[in-house]
Image: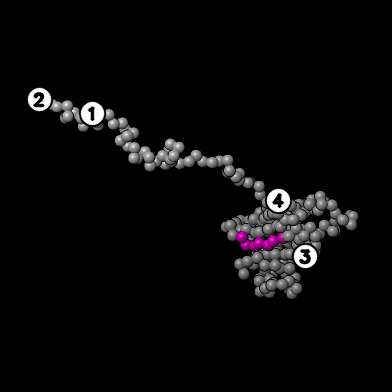
Amino acid sequence: MRFSWLTWLPLLAACNSTPSAMHEGTVSRITDQTGHDSSALPTPDTSRSKAVSAVSDTLRVARQQHNFSNPEGPPDTFQLVFRGPSILEGTGELTITSASGQVIFREMLTEPNLEASLVYEMKTPTASRAEREAFVLRRIDRFFLPSQFHTPAIDKKAAFPATVENLDRASWIDLRQRPDAIRFEYLKGKEDRHRIAWSPLKKEVVRVQ
């Protein structure tokens, strides 16, 4: 069977076509003017990445476990966390946390609250910054001494302290009748001594004196 040369022309044209020519329209849509593939993700720029600071403002932590809300245990966790830009510019957070993880007491103590009683130890009219800082740190470290926990919380012969604000007489009388109730004492300021206990009647911490 004989073929004319005209029959082979379409076949020869197809064979001479290159893949780039056949897909030229597609290639032009995914390359930019420089010929780079614009569909690919750009290389991450790490030159401007900021380092994560691990510096904390916590300056001192005192922690102690002691029976309090439950005289028979397990013990509660007493904690004083002092934070701030410096020892003489910080604030302390006093918390008592039950064994179940519930914070049952919280109070903020300023730096002056912790430093005020320094006047009773000063041998000169003024104290240096180093002496003041050392005193505040010592107060924090000694905040939960065993001598600050007392049983019973209230002596049976004690009279109701009417001068203590927000003191509930009923809960105070109930605590006075509990020989195993525990009292915690701490000094706030120069002479303001706080005495607190857990009230089973109110299910909260109360100031007893």
Pointer 2: what residue?
1
Q: Is residue 32 visible?
A: yes
SS at circle 4:
strand
Which mark is nearer the camera, 4 or 1?
A: 1
SS at circle 3:
strand
Label 3 to label 4, Cα distance in Å? Answer: 24 Å
Pointer 4: what residue?
59
Please tell me which residue is depicted at 69% across the width and 54% down the height of the picture. Answer: 83
Q: In the depicted view, which residue is nearer to us: 136 or 23?
A: 23
Residue 98 image point, x, y percent:
61, 58
User: What label does residue 168 carry, if any?
Assistant: none
Which amino acid, mark 1? Leu
Mark 1 vs mark 2: which is more N-terminal? 2
The reply to whether discs 3 and 4 touch (Cβ–Cβ < 8 Å) is no
Label 4 to label 1, Cα distance in Å? Answer: 85 Å
Pointer 3: what residue?
192
Label 1 to label 2, Cα distance in Å? Answer: 20 Å
Which amino acid, mark 4? Leu
The reply to whether discs 4 and 2 touch (Cβ–Cβ < 8 Å) is no
Image quadrant in which you'd find residue 25: top left
Pointer 1: what residue?
12
Asked whether residue 18 is drawn in magenta, I would say no
